[in-house]
Image: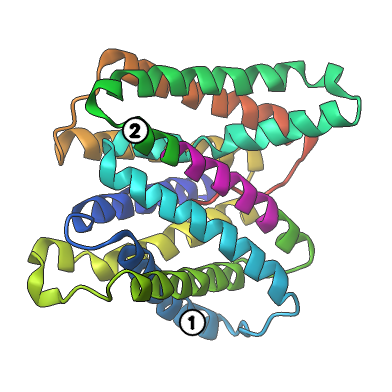
Amino acid sequence: MQALWMVWGSFFFATMAVGIKIASSDFSLFELVFYRGVVSVIFMVLVLRARGTPLRTPVPMMHAWRSLIGVLSLGAWFYAIAHLPLATAMTLNYMSGVWVAAFIAGGALLYGQGQRQGPLLATVLMGFAGVVMMLRPTLDQNQLFAGLIGLLSGLGAALAYLQVTALGKVGEPEGRTVFYFSLGSALVGIIGVAFTGGLTSWAEVRWQSTIWLIPIGVLGALGQWCMTRAYSRGSTLLVANLQYSGIVFGAFYSLVLFGDQIPLLGWAGMGVIVASGLLATVLRTRALPDTPPEVP
């Protein structure tokens, strides 16, 4: 059952990415961040009230820092989704596991324990080799910048993951963490909209884009909820590896819904990144057991 929760979470995130890609043709980046946040806020308020969890938190600054990093990562991911094949954008965001491994290996080197982190460092290098393989075929299509932004989204997700870990250690409920992240998304989104010309009138856009505005918020909240539930009740190693099913869902959507043409070298790069992420998860779980997921 715990494995199923993780697979469902990955499915929800991949489906949300479909909505972002479709809606990005009519709505700006800040508008998408705003709608993603405000719908999730409403959804999480209903969930928290039903479960009797208060909204008030004893660590508001920790939530503020986690939300800031998370929103920057979310915005970068949305940009990558709008400008890259969906499978590519999904894979770059899931580089967060490799980034966490890089942080662990870097910390070990800083404290003179690098000799123990050779295998973990190898998975990091393997992951970045996969990035080079995946982005190189897109150079002729002027997609390198979007690829770098997508890579930064994975870095931001890794930093947010570390903050989520800290919040869990001080006893913050997962639902409240999701709520404050959604609130931060809504606030940053509306501020960005105010500085970039205001909200687009729904009457001026295609109905295919409009109908996705509510689902992207609900799907995002459901994805985070399913993943945190899987980690709280199951084997950390098992569910962490199953999160990469999101790349499979993304690749399916990319081919079937958008007809994206990804060269063989690009698919090989995706495979290398998944393999490096799985290996990094195994190695870092030994060093940091029972840690939560890198939630997009």
Q: Foreground: 243 or 78? A: 78
> Going 72% across and 63% down the picture, which residue do you hit?
167
> Going 85% across and 16% down the picture, which residue do you hit?
115
Compared with 93, 181 (above or below) is: below
Kindly identify which residue carries mark 2.
88
Residue 236 image offset from top left, x and y in percent: 65, 43
Q: Foreground: 196 or 115? A: 196
Tell me which corner region of the image, top left, top right, bottom left or bottom right, holds residue 140.
top left
Residue 224 image offset from top left, x and y in percent: 49, 59
Relative horizontal placement of residue 262, taking residue 282 as reference (left or right): left
> Going 64% across and 43% down the picture, which residue do you hit?
235
Count residues near mark 1 (Cα–Cα under 10 Å), then give few for <14, some for 14-19, many for 20+. Answer: some
Mainly helix, strand or loop, the magenta region? helix
Which mark is on residue 45? 1
Count residues near mark 2 (Cα–Cα under 10 Å), then give few for <14, some for 14-19, many for 20+. Answer: many
Tell me which corner region of the image, top left, top right, bottom left or bottom right, holds residue 247.
top left
Q: Earlier in the sequence, mark 2 or mark 1?
A: 1
Tag 2–tag 1 contact (CB < 8 Å): no
* Count of numbered labels shown in the rendering: 2
Compared with 180, 147 (above or below) is: above
Q: Is residue 233 magenta?
A: no
Magenta stretch bounds: 150-164
Residue 97 image offset from top left, x and y in percent: 58, 36
Element assignment for label 1:
helix
Say what amino acid the circle numbered 2 marks. Thr
Tell me which corner region of the image, top left, top right, bottom left or bottom right, holds residue 282.
top right
Compared with 140, 88 (above or below) is: below
Relative horizontal placement of residue 80, taking residue 237 as reference (left or right): left
